[in-house]
Image (cartoon, rainbow, N blue to C red):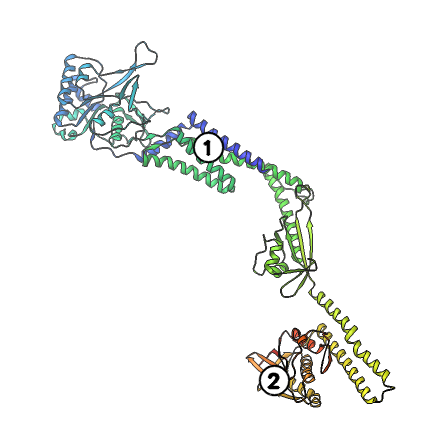
Amino acid sequence: MTSLRLRLEWWAMLTLCLAGLWALHSSGATGRLDSQVLDLATTLSAPEPSPDIVLLTVDDHSLRELGAWPWPRALHARVVDRLTAAGARAVILDFLMPDTGDPQDLSMLANAMARSGKVYLPHTFVPAPNTPDQLEPLLPATPLREQVAGMGHVVANPDPDGVLRRFDLSFDIGADRYPHLARVVAEQVGTRVADSADTAPVVPMLPVGSYQQLPVAEFLDDSGNAGFVRDKIVLVGAVAQGMGDQYSVASGPVTQMSGVETQANLLNALLGQKLVYTLPEAVSLMVGGACLAILFTGFWFMPPRRSLYLAIALVGATFALSVILVMAGKMWFAPGAALVMIVLAYPLWSWRRLSGLSRYIEGEIAWLGDGAPARPADGGLDFLARLTSKFQHLIRVMRQSLDFVERVIEASPDAMLVLDRDGRIVRFNSRARALFAGDRNLEGVTFVELLLLAKIAGSDQGRELVTEDGRTFLLARADLAPASNHSEADQPRAGEIVSLREVTHARRLEEERRHMLEFLSHDMRTPQAAIIALTRQIEGATNRAETAQRIRTQAQRTLKLADDFVQLARLGQAQIKLEECDLNALVEEACDRAFASAESAGVEIRYVPSDDCLFVPVDGSAIARMLDNLIGNAIKYCRPGDCVTIALASPGEHAVEIVVADTGPGLPEERLADPFARFGAHATQAGPSVGLGLALVKKVVEVHRVTVTFDSAPGQGTLFTIVLPVRP
């Protein structure tokens, strides 16, 4: 699936879910769910019943004792007088009294209300005459209206599910406003009720029987009950079976509650400022929209499992926010539409992505399956299971192919790197890691950056690379062809393979062959040409002995060159044989061999042995040859009377130094830069030299993997130091 199509589907799904959120909220389809959440929240946040509110109930016992309903207004007057005498703070007669009845009884009740001055009466609304839908108030009888402390409506409108949760604090008919009876009483006793955009707030309902109750008959018969109503707000209402209004309320489980007790709950909420006001519908839409935006953002950036966790978390957060707002802020927004759309959004998006993934896998299987081995027969419960089985088989084939490629790269005898189309390393073998990385991570580094980090320089117009330690590698590069299912225009190249083959030994051999040709063409021919010239002069020479001596000298020089050359070739090709040798003995024998030539040259040889018996793991013949060359060179270039010193010293417990020093003229300037250079012909007062002696010394040191240093100054002699391992 292309990136553009994925973005379009994402926006389309988000838009669809937002539209569904608006449709659910506008239609009220989630009203039952919203009501259940609201009932839970109000139950958790219900206030304690106020001790200032008590109920005088017209129950079955009172009806038996005082007579059947309706009671005469004189009996109501008796109740009012009794409450006034007992010191009630306010009296609410929760009975509609629009009729005149017996004028004398009505007058008695009006007089009792006048004496009390604290009696509140309810009224309701009825259809206005000759109007289709207009209402008008049905007020108490005129004598009662004139003596009442306050009036208010007691209209109760249950929600669509039949549960009473809200009360209209004010009811408007035209320009007239009629407050609720409980609001009138609350404001009269000193509680200010602020106007709100929500004129029908939710009332948290306490369970039935939460308020103190006393039957009217018991109150009238027992004068000792005066303390029950003193300084209390007394609601007088009917609770007997089949009498008065009954409502379904959500006080925990939905249950039936008498009208007078619902009025008590409303009054309790007003006095305690516990009414729950409904927030505007836009708030619910904003909360739901924000949750959907967060969820769809998670769909874009998170894997499916985490997206599921996010959806569950958003459901819990929306539910908790709705409940907490009711409990802590006395505000309510309907979360049902948001909860439903969050729950639906996850499977909807998952279905869309699964459908797209299924199409993609089918296409990849069709392409990959062309050259793949046949899949063994197996079944599947459904289309997706069969598709997954095919894809698993192809993944195994591709994994085996990838493993084979990895093993091929690893088995390569050369250092090998695989670069992507941007030139960054994506694959490499252990030889490449050993050459470039050490502990460095190669992945993601470009080849040029890698060369700079490893301090590797190019040579021969970039066809070879030379490391810091002098190793040479032949560089080979090849572009990877683009995948067969992409055109050249879409993908110019897929990457590059870089191979580095070490050719250090071959380059060294080439250098040696070059020097050999130079040696054979120049240095070996020079003494031979001199011998031929001298033989031509010998017939007419007057001093044949001198000529013969010169011929002998050139022949000895040729023999020495040939011998040194053979020794160098042997050290370069053959494996040395290390044996435990007594270093004192090797040095002493070398001094003995040089004694005759030193005596004839007038040079003193001074040997300083070690007091310890030193055994070193060396090739004895090679060390002897090295000592012969060092001592021979020192004697050769010394003047008569000079001294050559050969000493053994111990710089540490496990090392010994061989020191060969002379008091001769020192190395010439052209040899100071590299005294061990091979075939470097030059002339001194001691005769011509091609430098094979010191080259052999260097070779012996190299094959033994030890070190040699020198110190020389004109007129102050030369000092060579070789450090060897020693076994005490």
The spot of residue 43 in percent (x, y) is 32, 33
Which residue in the structure is indicated by mark 2? Answer: 647
Say if residue 126 shows up in the picture: yes
Front-lying residue, 378 or 464: 464
Cβ atoms under marks 1 and 2 closer than 8 Å: no
Secondary structure beneath disc 2?
A: strand
Identity of the residue furthest to the right in this view:
539
372 in relation to 413, above or below: above
The spot of residue 717 in percent (x, y) is 63, 82
478 in relation to 389, above or below: below
Frontmost of labels 1 and 2 is 2
The spot of residue 114 in percent (x, y) is 14, 20
Q: Report the quarter where the N terminus lies.
A: top right
Secondary structure beneath disc 1?
A: helix
180 in relation to 549, above or below: above
Which residue in the structure is indicated by mark 1? Answer: 341
**Residue 333 falls in which quadrant of the image?**
top left
**Going 65% across and 65% down the picture, which residue do you hit?**
470
Tell me if mark 1 has few (under 14), some (14-19) or many (20+) residues whose alpha carbon lies within 10 angstroms of its own: many
Amino acid at circle 2: Ala
Say if residue 413 shows up in the picture: no
Front-lying residue, 580 or 636: 636
Tell me if mark 2 has few (under 14), some (14-19) or many (20+) residues whose alpha carbon lies within 10 angstroms of its own: some
Amino acid at circle 1: Met
